[in-house]
Image (spheres, grey):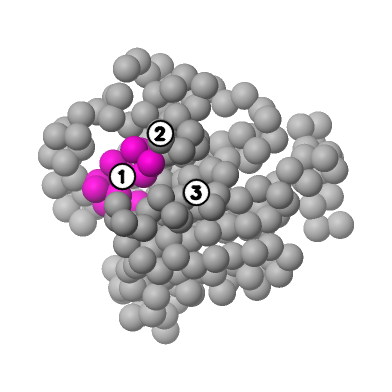
Amino acid sequence: MRYLQQNLVSEFGVSGQDRLNKAKVLIVGAGGLGTPVATYLAAMGIGTIGIADFDIIQETNLHRQFAFAPADVGKCKTEVLSTMLRKQNPDIKVYCHDVALICENAVAVVSEYDLICDCTDNVNTRILLDKICRVLNKKLLYGAVRGWEGYVTVLHGKALIGLTDVFSESDLLFESQNNCSVSGVISTVCGIIGCHQANEVVKIILGVESNLDGAIFCYDGLSNTSRIFRLKK
């Protein structure tokens, strides 16, 4: 009965729910994007969810990372978020990877999952995930938020486009100097972009073609406008 309403949707059905139950999704980053992505995927019945993050909860996280309460400040993000997800849906498996993903460990972690969600704000981790997903032939759901703006794209899909096919590493490293700790971030935009990432994950698992494979969704929360741009290498 839990999944009745989504199973009534034509793309789902019992077989679609079975696909979700068998899927394994890794969420890298348990912050403003990772929280809504993980929460919706867990609620919808993704069978196995991995959460990779080595950060601890800070007071400045609380305005956008709704899985955390003031009493959680100082605790490990992965542990608090995974506990909430298990309570929300006891039938799924949630694994914590309480480490920084680096060259020495990232391949072993990523290879355990079917789909990867890039919800981090660390540019070195983004570049590393892009390279590993290219080598392992795994789709990478990229999300980013800054100020009132947010972006989502599907990388390493049918279009065979990766992050560094669109942006050079030097440009990415330069842009990282203007992250949310400098330019700020609006919590509602995190939620909107996180929901879009989760939506693309579900579509891919169900075998529904994504129009963000080889394109990028750009959202402006200040003007309530959005556009989709096709990407070229």
Do the residues bearing badges 3 and 2 touch, measured as CB atoms within 8 Å?
no
**Circle 2: element type:** helix
**Mark 1: few, some, or many residues within 10 Å (few <14, many ≥20)?**
some
Q: Nearer the viewer, mark 1 or mark 3?
A: 3
Which residue does the image show at 46% across and 50% down from the upper left? 110
Q: CA distance from mark 2 to mark 1?
A: 10 Å
Q: Amino acid under label 2?
A: Arg
**Circle 3: element type:** loop
* Residue 105 image-quadrant placement: bottom left
Q: Nearer the viewer, residue 209 or 106?
A: 106
Q: Is residue 94 above or below residue 164?
A: below
Image coordinates of residue 52 in percent, x first then y, are 43, 60
Residue extending farthest to the bottom is 71
Image coordinates of residue 159 in percent, x first then y, are 47, 19
Q: Point out which mark residue 111 bears.
A: 3
Q: Which residues are magenta?
A: 120-132
Dominant secondary structure of the magenta stretch?
helix
Image coordinates of residue 206 in percent, x first then y, are 70, 35
Give whichever of discs 3 and 2 has the lower sequence position: 3
Which residue does the image show at 65% across and 48% down from the upper left? 23
Q: Point out which mark residue 77 bears.
A: none
Give whichever of discs 1 and 3 has the lower sequence position: 3
**Mark 3: few, some, or many residues within 10 Å (few <14, many ≥20)?**
some
Q: Quadrant of the N terminus?
A: bottom right
- Is residue 224 visible from the viewing direction of this image? no
- The residue tagged 1 is 128
Q: CA distance from mark 1 to mark 3?
A: 13 Å
**Mark 2: few, some, or many residues within 10 Å (few <14, many ≥20)?**
some
Q: Is residue 213 left or right of residue 172?
A: right
